[in-house]
Image (cartoon, rainbow, N blue to C red):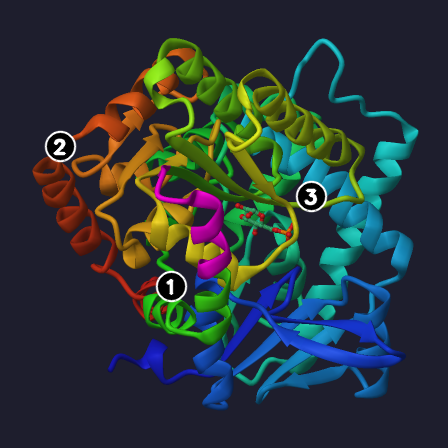
Amino acid sequence: MADAFSNPVVIASNRGPVSFSKVDGSLVGRRGSGGLVSGLAPLVEAGRATWIAAAMSDADREASAAGNGVVEVDGLRVHLLDIDREVQRRHYDEVSNSTLWFVHHGLYDLVRSPVYDVDWWTSWEAYREANAAFAAAIVAEAPTGATVLVQDYHLCLVARIARLERDDLRFIHFHHTPFAGPEELRVLPPSVREELLDGLASHDACGFHTSRWETNYLACQEQVLTGAGRTFTATLNSDLDDMRSVAASEACREAGASIDAVVDGRQVVARVDRMELSKNIARGFAAFDRLLEMRKDLHGNVVFLACCYPSRLGVDEYRRYRDEVVQAAELVNERWGTDDWTPVELMTDDDFPRSVAVLQRYDVLLVNPIRDGLNLVAKEGPAVNERDGALLLSTEAGAYSELSDEVLPLFPFDIEGTARSIGAALDMDADDRMHRAKALTAAVQRRTPEAWLEDQLRAV
Ligand code: G6P
């Protein structure tokens, strides 16, 4: 293996791979799931990497204080930074989630937002401060010559600051969301835009899930002429072995039995998402409503299993969106439901084994984001599905470029088109379904989370 693979590694991410909650007065640690944790945790467990993350809740802060800044869950050690609560709130809710995430997903309604008032500028200072706290931890903790893997838009300035004191370190940034094009990035104040792009260009290389986001990034850099540095693309996959072991678990079997009782032999349309503004959940329900309007033959014969989990409830827009999603599902049920058929089964409590049980059972998986860096569900679904289900995938998801040959494409704003595509997918004959499903399963198995890690290290 090349040198980059034997160098020590430091991982910096805002959300860490472990989190804590208080149960009956005691701290309980939980390990996160998903591709990022699967890809990076083995390196930490092998003693080759240090993971630095922010404490995100009071329980995280308490656990961090109890361990002098270091916590350990199931053998995974993490440095949890106790950044001042208000600084972290402004850094995470106001700048990362309500500004940068909006810009990169193209979600602003420019008539009303963004607004850069005095409060926002205070938040921008907090963003800098939180980035400086990460940089200080890296400066203090990183072994000589380490490679630092900085994850995502929360930490764009870290490398720039840390380099001032540690010129022995290499920095790689990986951007998990889409990257805005130059025109969209112009929504940020010019000084902020330049500082962020300069921060990103301070890395030895910047990585993206697909070339579409990489191209946007390079075009943005070209406009400010700081010089972009090296870039690369490396798509992430979930740990499919892990998904399959959850699929074989007792919890998943039990959840599956209750789902079977609800489904009762009907066809299944499904989705599994965090209730994020980019996921386009309400338009998905509107399309299902339109389908039921067009196709009376489906009444009583299809059910939409929607696992939609609350996310970022510290942000007003997200709380409103959660209410909109619930209302949109209720509308469909009020309009078409009968005593023995509820068209949309909306499940909002986050239950991973149950999500996997739903993914095993879909005939049609709806993944229709407005824009998404990747969308791992588009890969996780086909990996565990047992019914030769079809995948309806938004052309605006990063995963689309990888899977375009095996999916039914969706233009996420087109409700009529989405309705018709769901109908066509439900009608697909068994042979066609089987062929597509086989090809799709093969496509999602092409990569492991470890391959994604290796691509980052290779970029040094
Ligand atoms: C979305 C984005 C990721 C980002 C994540 C952060 O899923 O696609 O790029 O890392 O949000 O989530 P969090 O819950 O930490 O805000």
**Residue 378 picture location, percent across and down:** 36, 45
Query: Considering the numbered disc 2 on the image, is that residue within a helix, a strand or a loop?
Result: loop
Query: From mark 2 to mark 1, how far is it between C-alphas?
Result: 42 Å
* Mark closest to the chain's N terminus, 1 or 3: 3
Residue linked to disc 3? 96
Does 118 appear above or below 137? above
- Mark 1 element type: helix
Please name which of the two marks, 2 or 3, marks the residue nearer to the observer. Answer: 2
Looking at this view, is 404 or 260 the one in front? 260
Residue 308 vs residue 398, the one in the foreground: 308
The quadrant where residue 124 appears: top right
The quadrant of the picture occupied by the N terminus is bottom left
In magenta, the rendered stretch is 256-267
Main secondary structure type of the part rendered in magenta? helix
Residue shown at 68%/25% (left/top)? 327
The answer to whether the beta carbon of the residue marked 3 is less than 8 Å from any atom of ligand 1 is yes
Question: Residue 330 is drawn in which quadrant?
Answer: top right
Left or right position of 120 against 366? right
Could you tell me which residue is drawn at 57 percent across and 29 percent down? Answer: 339
Give the amino acid at mark 2. Asp
Rendered location of residue 79, percent (x, y):
69, 78
Give coordinates of residue 11: x percent, y percent.
55, 71
The numbered mark, 2 or 1, whose residue comes first in the sequence reads: 2
* Residue topped by disc 2: 429
